[in-house]
Image (cartoon, rainbow, N blue to C red):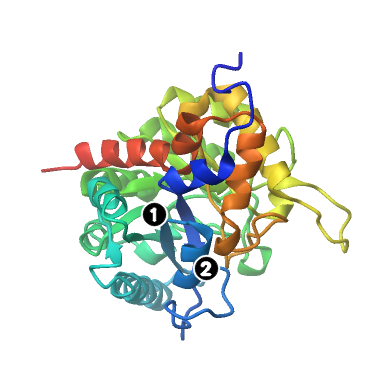
Amino acid sequence: MTFWRSGHGADATALHAATLTLDTHVDIRWPEPPDPLAEGPMRVDFPKMARGGLRAAVFVAYVPQGRRDAAGHAAAADRAEAMLRHIRARADGARRRFCATAAELEAAHAAGATGVLSAVENGYAMGHDLGAPARWRALGACYLTLTHDGHNDLADSARPKRELGDAESEHGGLSALGRRAIAALNAAGMLVDVSHVSKAGMMQAAELSRSPVVATHTACRALCDHPRNLDDEQLDLLRAVGGLVQITAVPAFLRRVPEGTTNPASVEDMAEHVDHAVRRIGIEHVGLSSDFDGGGGVRGWQNAAESAGLTAALAARGYDARAIGLLWSGNFLRVWRRAEALAAP
């Protein structure tokens, strides 16, 4: 069934210009981030966003996995909150607006301003502090990625870190603390990001969360057998809970190539993964992200200045204005609004 296709290639330039293009996972360098107002070495800065017609981005407060003790958790929390404050300060309230809600993002786009959003990557930054989601939400964060590479006290990771002593599985998915953390995220109105989480943990989180979960940067395991990708059973569960899978521009997630060789992944490979997910679970449950400055970058979309290349690849496959709008931002806005609506008063 191809209800999501227009039947012909649309005018990609016009489509891109008319779309609220939101990249939902962009890393920043920390500490000592470069000035985002200047053209610099990062794949995403405001000049590149302007040239590429990228209207908004979720900049991520990423915390690497470390020792799970009081000192490690305290340092991780301090780093995450310092990064959230820095991201918020990137907005000037005029040409660049910080957006803590879906409505604020839509208003910024309507006013012609660039949307600046934030999130936290790796629940390690929570430690055992179930009050953290409310604090992060107050700072404007829209989601928490439950794990990164390496298990933490909330959940098992899809990629255990042997150097930290990780077994293949520690919690069997979510820990008891992780289950309470999901309740705290729901109460705070933060989305639960299941990227990086083991299959068992991802499926438990999807079933437990009151609001739809989202995998903000992943791809389809049916097309590329990588531990960070979601298989068809996981995709089906996302549809069942109203959630979202966002295909990302990490070459290793899109194509498997012999170790030590250059990965030729391109926007066409991204479009192939989009096609698979759309056929499997429907256009309303699929989105896009780059993971720029965290490993993302493919031929045709190497940085924010080339964002129109992805729209062109999708338009060439027959995705029309409605479909491209849903992929770039509409579906994420839907699940974000739902998380906001279900937050504790």
Mark 2, Cα crowd under 10 Å, few <14 / some 14-19 / many 20+, is many
Residue farthest bottom in this picture: 32
Can residue 320 be seen here? Answer: yes
> Pointer 2: what residue?
48
Q: Residue at x 33, y 45 (%)?
A: 182
CB atoms of marks 2 and 1 within 8 Å: no
Q: Determine the CA span between mark 2 and mark 1.
A: 26 Å
Position in image of residue 47 (x %, y %): 48, 71
Q: Quadrant of the N terminus?
A: top right
- Choose mark 2 or mark 1, whichever is in front: 2
Can residue 45 be seen here? Answer: no
- The disc placed on residue 144 is 1
Q: Amino acid type of disc 2? A: Lys
**Mark 1 falls on what kind of element?**
strand
Image mark count: 2
Mark 1, Cα crowd under 10 Å, few <14 / some 14-19 / many 20+, is many
